[in-house]
Image (cartoon, coloured by chain):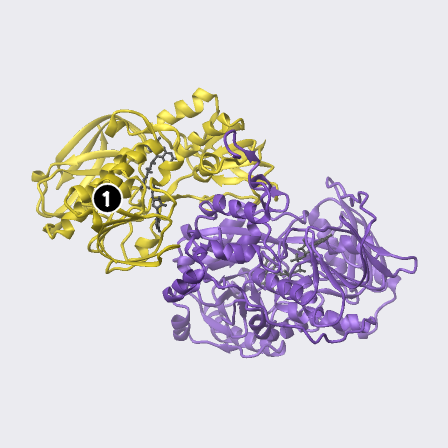
Chain colours: A yellow, B purple
Amino acid sequence: MNAKVAVIGGGPAGLGAAVAAYEAGINPEDIHIIERDMELGGILQQCIHNGFGQLIFGEMMTGPEYASHYIDEVLKAGIRFHLNTMVLDISPDRVITAVNQEECLMRINADSIILAMGCRERTRYQIHLPGERPAGIYPAGTVQRLINIEGALPGRRAVILGSGDIGMIMARRLVLEGAEVEGVYEIMGSPSGLPRNVQQCLRDFEIPLHLSHTVTGIHGNRRLEGVTISRVNPESLKPMPGTERYVECDTLVLSVGLIPENELSEGAGIKLDGWTGGPIVDEERETSVDGIFGCGNAVHVYDLVDDVTKSSELAGRSAARYVKGETICREHVLSITAGENVRYTVPQHIRKQSDEPVEVFFRVYLEAANVKLQALVAAEVISEESRRVVKPPIMEKIILQGDLLPVDGEIIIQVVEK
Amino acid sequence: MTPISRTPNRDKIDSEVRQVPPDSRMGRRIAKKIRERVPSAEVDVQVEDGIAYLSGRTGTWNEYLGAGYAAGGMKGIRGVVADITVDGMPKKELRRPDRPKEVIKEDEDVIIVGGGVIGCFIARELSRYDLKVTLVEKELDVATGASKANNGCVHVGIDPGKGTLKHRLCLRGNAMFDKVAQELDVPFRRVGTLLVITDRTLPENVASKIPDSLRKLVLKYVLPHMVLLYGKRKNVPGLRKIPKEEVRQIEPNLTDDYHSAVLMPTMGIISPYELVIALAENAVENGVDLMLDTEVTGILVNEKNEVEGIQTAKGIMRGKYVINAAGVYADELAETAGAREFTIHPRKGALIIFDKKLAGYTSHVVSELLLGQDKHTKGGTAMLTTDGNPEWGPSAIEVPDRDDTSVTSDEIHDILKKYAHLFPHIEAGSMIRYFAGVRAATFTEDFFIGASRKASGLINVAGIQSPGLASSPAIAEYVLDILRAEGLGMEEKPGFNPIRESPPKFSELSVAEMEKLIREDTRYGNIMCRCEKVTEREILDAIRAPLPALTVDAVKRRTRSGMGRCQGGFCLPRLIKVLARELDVPLEEVQKKKGGKVISSRTKEGGQ
Ligand SMILES: Cc1cc2nc3c(=O)[nH]c(=O)nc-3n(C[C@H](O)[C@H](O)[C@H](O)COP(=O)(O)OP(=O)(O)OC[C@H]3O[C@@H](n4cnc5c(N)ncnc54)[C@H](O)[C@@H]3O)c2cc1C
Ligand SMILES: Cc1cc2nc3c(=O)[nH]c(=O)nc-3n(C[C@H](O)[C@H](O)[C@H](O)COP(=O)(O)OP(=O)(O)OC[C@H]3O[C@@H](n4cnc5c(N)ncnc54)[C@H](O)[C@@H]3O)c2cc1C
């Protein structure tokens, strides 16, 4: 089978990219979306809460509502898609190997590929959570799937570790389902999820949020019986002896971070960024391997699906341009470097010749008030914006005007006090 | 691994032939030794037939252990029963609720208690003969105790003292593995041990006394030579000193910061739980009755102290011989027959596993020679599993609770630190899992295998800590000899089939083979575990096998579903649906393991 644009993953990123490639003039028959789940929509299908689409549609939608908008576009356009199909391998010369029950084994020779595999959740082992290994310890996304898709309530009394968005949303969901949530515990001094979720999911439901606390023991070796909670030193983040408290619970929900899913990318020889966990991409979202693009949570973890959609539309347009042979590379690559109080940037460099503005996404290390976001070239500010406050859970963005970009060298992104 | 250390009872067997002091004198000597080692303990000692019975109290668990070891280290003592209370720790009352008196089995030849590697190996070997054999296991699967939570090393036999059962059975067991692994289709590879001698090999106090130049000489030439001699003395074949250039080729990620290295080629690695499952399946196919979810609450003996059967949570089973392979609970089980000859004290060991994407990072069992360490808690290696994941550990920590399989922050940290000496560049973030198992240690530190001298028909196969897995084929063989000596007639069964085939593993196949399988059965095209690429068909194979997988963990041990980097986050909701459907139970009854339900109920809208 041949494809001009093959999209791996049918979540909001994959859908947005496919539709954008179509709108950029690729024949819908030549666009293939490959999705391992039984339906399109990705993680949105299990996010039945309101909170999607404010930026793009100007209204709050549920996850499935938001997804169905793009699924309709895919159907209307006649873009091809394969469900229940798992991609096993992508080769550097863009041959995709996938399996499903109908075709058995699919091989797709693709002119371009868009990676949109989303992300997976961190497990207790990645945060070195000590103790026993009983039933009843689940990542928040798994709890969400159990409750919203399988109609299964994981337990009766839960402790939530980590104040990521999914964790807070699941705290509320558990309460609505009649379970008790003893509290949300966060090792850092501030919540790691969006402020609106702290308000709507925790405060409005009187669920206590304990900052600078973590779980230091897991008890029960068949079903979870309880956890030990300790206060941590705010600087070293180490548990403080003498502050231990036993909390009885049968469920521990982990909301301790997401990791872009990139085993396939690694297999294709794509270079990953140690900070984002996703591929290193240029301003058109092309990875280090020719003709392979990336978008959505597979590149870096987004807070808002609207930004996912925008990034994926960019990747879709870029893939179309690539297939049509319209891409013009710059003579010199411009690197984008994370400067003061900036953890990482996406894109990591600029490689194409274009006058279009470049949006650089980034996250800060530390919360700060009254700051300027700046882009510097050779110590000169080429772009600047003010913010009343910046926080690690909120993704930031600065726009670089195409005509101001230098011929070569480095662009530094930084966040400094006004 | 520290070859140059002596286990306390290395000369025990020899000493039994020598002159042994009479019981009362022995008792006084042990009491004196305990007073020396643990002055605050109040312990009374009786010796009878080579068994030391300690009673009294101590202040701490460590003192309790000290007293036990003082007795166990004495020449001529073959078992230690420690009836010592520890202040602040209530003595556990053996709970014996009334059990059904209904007789559910009439006249078994052999009843085996415990479905670990030992019980299952014995069952499989007995299934060669025309005998009625039942294996009874309290959990919902075999391999749920130490046999699932170990390194999977088929040790070469250099560690145990000469003259111990451990030494003899490990040497013999090691040599038996190729055949059994092949017959049972279990992944097994002789990868070899690489023992490296580093700046940490000599203990501080020794190293500081030797001048620099001499120390280098010792580390570079003398110690490897001594290891070779030591190997020879222990009858371990094939040891050789291996030059650095060669090490660089065969183990390129190993640090260069060492003085010399010795290769021990007979070290093997095996998937321990797959071995146990294969043994159990093969035993079942050859006629052994395997009863899961059946706790044995007592051994029944008559007034002549002859074994008559067992009491279980489901009823009484009558039989002539009872094999006690109950792991950490073997002493409590023997006690129910009034046959106390040893006490088990649990020793926990934690291991960490790295992402399979690092397959090939390590290709040997790599150990650092560390002299002068506590002989009971030393050891540990940086190795690989048969699936290729790097695996580091174990730790060794004495714990009072036999079911304590927790892993502490210190253990994780210490293991990561210890083996980073050997592999400094591994990415700690690629650790995907840790777990712990409990070793069933006795105070004599040797296997305790033999016909009980207190209850005839009871065969104890106890104290099987490391190298218990490596020795398991030889232990089974030895136990059959004991049964023969105890009068059990064995006649070979013509239909015995030693071969067991494991179902295909999709992820290990070539693309062409994958395609072929999916054409045969489309359920191979439905991937349920994304990390390990386990298909629906493989899950069904596990649930419908001769020894069916009844829990999430049982499916995991057979298929690897949930063993990858997301640790089941993806496949768990999918897997429990299949289990519920196949076992024909409601979703809320599906268990991770016995007593560990995955969900508590349906949601308000769920359940339709
Ligand atoms: C619990 C939760 C709550 C959220 N709440 C909000 C909110 O209130 N508001 C908001 O704006 N955003 C929210 N988000 C964020 C938003 O949903 C995500 O950012 C967005 O879904 C990411 O889209 P994606 O397409 O990159 O990834 P996904 O939605 O994860 O889609 C990836 C797709 O790729 C498929 N795939 C992966 N690997 C393969 C393979 N090998 N073969 C075939 N298919 C594959 C997967 O099955 C999946 O369908 C929330 C996210 C979660 C998890
Ligand atoms: C961390 C660690 C690492 C190790 N590494 C190695 C190694 O690399 N190589 C090696 O050779 N050895 C190793 N060992 C030792 C090895 O694991 C053991 O020697 C071996 O598994 C013991 O097997 P077993 O069958 O005696 O015990 P177990 O596997 O514990 O089996 C005992 C069984 O009896 C059952 N049972 C108990 N009481 C009852 C009852 N009342 N009724 C019914 N059933 C009951 C239990 O449920 C259990 O299934 C290691 C051990 C540990 C802990």
**Looking at the image, residue B159 lies above or below residue B204:** below
Q: Residue at x 48, y 38 (%)?
A: A150
Amino acid bearing label 1: Gly
Residue A142, percent from left and from top: 46, 40
Residue B549, relative to residue A180: is it above or below? below
Percent coordinates x, y for residue A58 in the rendering: 25, 25
Left or right for A215, reference B89: left
On the question of residue B23 being in view, the answer is yes
Among the 4 quarters of the image, the one containing residue B396: bottom right
In which quarter of the view is residue B178 placed?
bottom right
Which residue is most to the right?
A: B303
- Image coordinates of residue B590 in percent, x first then y, are 58, 44
Determine the quadrant in which ligand 1 lies.
top left
Secondary structure of residue under mark 1: loop
What residue is shown at x 75% (from left), y 54% (from top)? Answer: B67
User: What x and y, as percent, mark residue B407?
Assistant: 56, 47
Using residue A313 as the reference point, say whether residue B367 is left or right of it: right
Examine the rendered structure and indicate whether residue A40 appears above or below residue B424: above
Quadrant housing the N terminus of chain B: bottom right
Label 1: chain letter: A
- Asked whether, in this view, residue B395 is left or right of residue B333, the answer is left
Ligand 1 within 8 angstroms of badge 1 C-beta: no
In the depicted view, which residue is nearer to us: B43 or A146? A146
Q: From where the camera sits, is residue B35 visible? A: no
Q: Residues within 10 Å of mark 1 (few under 14, many from 20)?
A: some
The residue beneath circle 1 is A78
Residue sitting nearer the eye, A272 or A108: A108
